[in-house]
Amino acid sequence: MRTTLNLDTAALDSAMKTAPGKTKTDVINEALREYARKRRLLGFLELEGTLSWEGDLDELRKRSLDS
């Protein structure tokens, strides 16, 4: 989809330097995906303390990786 944007030139130049060989479109799309991922992760923090878990943590730690 084509969209006209007014971008911060310095921010875009900085991003382009950390992602050599990528196009502006690639860098912007990657940034949008990363932004969305981080926002979803922040949503998980809102669940902190609202869920209960019942189990034996010591027993889980004793399990071997083969089982």
Image: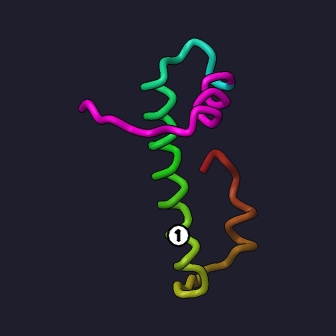
Q: Quadrant of residue 49?
A: bottom right
For badge 1, the amino acid type reads Phe
Which color scheme is applied?
rainbow
Nearer-the-camera pick, 5 or 53: 5
Q: Which residues are magenta?
A: 1-17
How many marks the image carries: the answer is 1
Q: Is residue 5 above or below residue 19?
A: below
Nearer-the-camera pick, 32 or 60: 32
- Label 1 crowd (10 A; few <14 / some 14-19 / many >=20): few
Q: Is residue 2 above or below residue 43?
A: above
Q: Is residue 60 above or below residue 31?
A: below
Relative placement, left or right, of 8 versus 26 is right
Q: Going 39% across and 38% down the picture, which residue do you hit?
A: 5
Q: Is residue 5 above or below residue 23?
A: below
Q: Going 58% across and 32% down the picture, which residue do you hit?
A: 9
Q: Going 68% across and 25% down the picture, which residue do you hit?
A: 18
